[in-house]
Image (cartoon, rainbow, N blue to C red):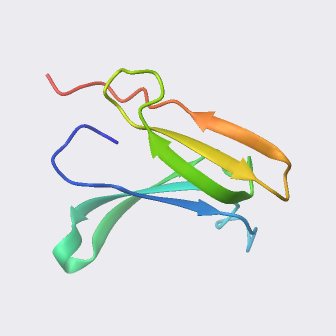
Amino acid sequence: MDNDNDEELVIGIRDDAGDNTRRGLRIYDPVDAANGDWQRTVVDPGGVAIEDLAVGDLDGDGRNDVIAVGRQTHNVRIYWNKTQPDQ
């Protein structure tokens, strides 16, 4: 997702457990995965109660985008990956 050598984990959340755990998209980037150290990025908190998601390069730019579908929220969102390539 961010053009480095490690793989990110993309997770969809469909329930609001509280203000800090709103439904939406989470991306976890390993900082030191062997020791359980990950950086969490919350994308569009509360925007979609994700029932299903898929990751793929939708626009052919070489970066994976995310498609999220919400059954409870009755919506579909595309999250375009605008991460800048490493120079």
Q: Residue at x 32, y 65 (%)?
A: 38
Q: Position of residue 10 (x, y in %)?
A: 46, 56
Q: Residue at x 51, y 30 (%)?
A: 80
Q: Residue at x 26, y 55 (%)?
A: 7
The number of numbered badges drawn on the structure is 0
Q: Quadrant of residue 44?
A: top right
Q: Answer with left or right where residue 48 lies relative to residue 2.
A: right
Q: Quadrant of the N terminus?
A: top left
Asked if 31 appears above or below 60 in the picture, the reply is below
Q: Position of residue 26 (x, y in %)?
A: 52, 56
Q: Residue at x 67, y 51 (%)?
A: 45
Q: Is residue 12 visible?
A: yes
Farthest bottom residue in view: 35
The one nearer the camera, 41 or 60, is: 60
Q: Position of residue 76 (x, y in %)?
A: 73, 41
Asked if 16 appears above or below 83 in the picture, the reply is below
Q: Answer with left or right where residue 62 lies relative to residue 12.
A: left
Q: Is residue 24 visible?
A: no
